[in-house]
Amino acid sequence: MNDNVIAPAGERLRALGSLVAHARANAAKNNRPLVTELTTLARCTTDEIAETSESVLGLRYFSLQALVETTPQFVQISFTDCVNRAILPILLGDEVCFVVSDPWDDEALQWLSNKIGCYPTLAWGAKFEILEALEQAQQRLKASSVLPIGVANKGESADFSSNVISIETIERSSSPIVRFVDAAIYDAWKAGASDIHFECDRSGVHVKLRLDGVLVVGAELPDRIRAEEVISRIKVLAQLDIAERRVPQDGRFRIELGSRELDFRVSIMPSIFGEDAVVRLLDKAQLRGDAQAISLNSLGLDADAISRIRRMAKQPHGMLLVTGPTGSGKTTTLYAALTEIQTGQEKIITIEDPVEYELPGVLQIPVNEKKGLTFSQGLRSILRHDPDKILVGEIRDAETAEIAVQAALTGHLVFTTVHANSVFDVISRFVHMNIDLYSLMSALNGVVAQRLIRSNCPACVQAEPISEELLARMKSAEMNVDQLHPARGRGCDKCRNTGYKGRHAIAEVLPFDDALRAMILNRSDVGEIKRHALQIGIRPLVLRALDLVASGATTLEEIDRVVAHD
């Protein structure tokens, strides 16, 4: 007979309590998780321990999957302490339960009891899984909702010196005003927001984040006096005049977030309730170290648009114009085109306001109007710096437009943007600036009209019935209605209950051929010019947007918000 007979699983699991001391000693000796040593001694699996732990040991065991599905509570213990001690406070029913890696560690339990003022309700899990759950919690953590923002006591003063923002620095700050502003900036950065709006009214200050081009409600501070102090804090960061409240002010500041430095542009505007502030986040280093991270393919444009843009970007000279509203990704598209054609054999210079990304091997010049460095002045200087390709962040005035056109006519390839509603409105904008039409037509290689459409959230998207309106739109556009798969996001935590997460870029690309140039110079009817564009294969924005709806990538309401349709 074999003497090494293994006891039945049920018997081994019922003996877990007698194995804990031995397992704890082995865990300390081997520097391995307690649950790993316990499964080795009991000759069972982690799943079996999770199933029987509460009945045998009197403590519930949480796997990583169970931990990430819980709601963390960082009110009684700070997030920093939780990370340092591998503790995850979670809400179970009406009480807070503390998940620890070793619930039999008397010293750790004494610290925890002193911290919360009573004996804690405990559960346990593997240390590395608790830390992973904390890391995932931090990814979705809203500092403004879990940190004690509160109202300050009269004796508390604001600490305006910190240039680093993290959960730890927010928790350490003694000033509720600093905590409120820093938490709003931290939340915006974690959420991927492009702007933070601080809106003041008679009740206090409300924070809104611009996510995927739409404002989403954030934290609030219901105190009129504190609202003024919030705006003053932002002014101090941007080195603006805190005493001046009657005229608009603009400034900028830099803060370290997540081991990288971000630039912030600030706009202060007077209102009937005091002042409002808008802070724009600019992560210039997000492409550093990965020069190929941005390309036309990475923007999500369709293959036809990418092919047309590439052909225009590879011309030896001329002008490539991208048009669209603010925040439609115009500069990003030009950066992508520049990155693709950069070989190191040509001099590339940009002038921007502000510099949005750092591009290796490219001379990037920030506009500084206070010092006299405007787009037009900078462009003049660039032409004396022996460039091959030039990027002008935006054409805002006739002088810049004139210099850009002349540069394109004298052997340079010019990339630039202009605000216009469509590819055809661009010509009107230049004519309004008194630019010679013949010179413009000779310089232009093509125009790209671009928009960003919010995508359905992949975590909560579900199919929906085909609506009569969508069917009518598709038929009116003479599109195939047999391949309709409309869908809509229900709304979940990952998309902040909006139903949308991320954005798709769509573009209408119009290359200029001789026939099109002749029609414009001859002042042909706009309808005739549009018909010619359709004949050479131009697909309008509205049709590209409908393609996304038909494939279930977005909704009809979203494309109506962004793209005008006839």
Image (cartoon, rainbow, N blue to C red):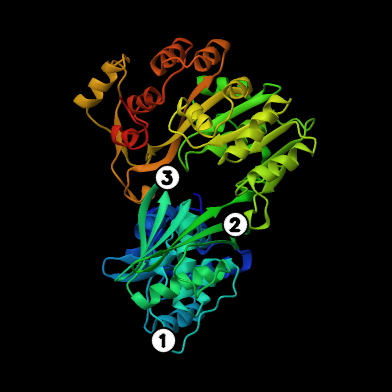
- Name the image quarter holding the C terminus: top left
**Can residue 43 be seen from the camera position used here?**
no
Q: Residue 497 at what x, y percent from top left?
A: 31, 49
Residue 187 versus residue 99: which sits nearer the camera? Answer: 187
Task: Characterize the local packing of mark 1: few (<14), some (14-19) or many (20 or more) Cα atoms within 10 angstroms.
Answer: few
Q: Which amino acid does label 1 sit on?
A: Asn
Rendering quarter of residue 184: bottom left
Separation of marks 1 and 2 at Cα, in angstroms: 32 Å
Residue drawn at 45 percent across, 10 percent down: 535
Please name the residue that numbered disc 3 is placed on.
Answer: 212
Residue drawn at 68 percent across, 27 percent down: 408
Residue drawn at 50 percent across, 17 percent down: 520
Dot 2 or dot 3: first in sequence order is 3
Dot 1 or dot 2: first in sequence order is 1
Residue 401 shown left or right of residue 448 in the figure: right
Please name the residue that numbered disc 1 is placed on.
Answer: 153
Could you tell me which secondary element the residue under label 2 belongs to?
strand
Please name the residue that numbered disc 2 is placed on.
Answer: 262
Q: How many labels does the image show?
A: 3
Farthest residue to the left: give it. Answer: 468
